[in-house]
Amino acid sequence: MPHPQDNLANDSNTSDTSMEAVDGTEAENIDSFPSIEEQLRQAELQSAEHHDAWLRAKAETENMRRRAQEDISKAAKFAIERFANELLVVKDSLEQTLAVEGATPEAIREGVDLTLKNLSKAFEKSGLQEISPIGEKFDPHKHQAISAIPSDQPANTVVQVFQKGYTLEGRVLRPALVAVAQSA
């Protein structure tokens, strides 16, 4: 029969072995964790990478802003280019009309009519439209009344146009100079 002291001895051996196993595991775990210096070095490397990425993003943003400003500047500078190209056709037409030697009044009129058609096309292509307000109710945003005349039309109706008005893409470029019907 085993002696109780033997059991204690066996228990203490078991206990020492388990302590060694625990101590050995802790030692392995401690060895598997990087040292504080290694962790600091990795954090500094990661910080440097993030700083570099931030600097690159900042530089890209500045480049995009600069390119956008250049594009806006070019757009403002050359916005009239399309209209100018259309006006060259009008100028050519006028020069051809004037270049004809001994032209009759009818030929000159025909040349001027052609020039006017070319100018109207240029206006249309560029979004420039005439304001033709005869018979319309007076609108101070599109018309400028310079006189009121007696008329059988309702009061404040445009009855005469002295100078045509124009809009550019829906915005009034020049109001029409008009006479309106006077209230009776």
Image (cartoon, rainbow, N blue to C red):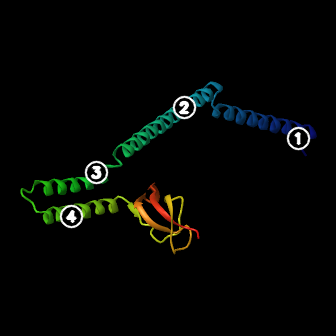
Amino acid bearing label 2: His
Q: Residue 105 location in percent, x, y?
A: 14, 63
Q: Which mark is residue 21?
A: none
**For mark 3, what is the residue?**
84
Q: For the residue carrying disc 2, how many other residues have a C-alpha within 10 Å: few (<14), some (14-19), or many (20+)? A: few
Q: Mark 3 to mark 1: distance in Å?
A: 111 Å
Q: Which mark is residue 51?
A: 2
Q: Which mark is residue 114?
A: 4
Amino acid bearing label 4: Leu
Amino acid bearing label 3: Ala
Q: Residue furthest top?
A: 37
Between discs 3 and 1, the one toward the N terminus? 1
Q: In front of the other: label 3 or label 1?
A: 3
Q: Residue furthest right?
A: 4
Whether pointer 2 and pointer 1 mark residues with C-beta atoms closer than 8 Å, the reply is no
Between discs 4 and 2, the one toward the N terminus? 2
Q: In front of the other: label 4 or label 2?
A: 4
**In which quadrant of the rendered image does the C terminus lie?**
bottom right
User: Residue at horizontal 26%, vertical 62%?
Assistant: 116
User: Residue at horizontal 54%, vertical 31%?
Assistant: 51
Q: In front of the other: label 2 or label 1?
A: 2
Between discs 2 and 3, the one toward the N terminus? 2
Q: In front: 13, or 99?
A: 99
Q: Quadrant of residue 86?
A: bottom left
Q: Is residue 145 left or right of residue 16?
A: left
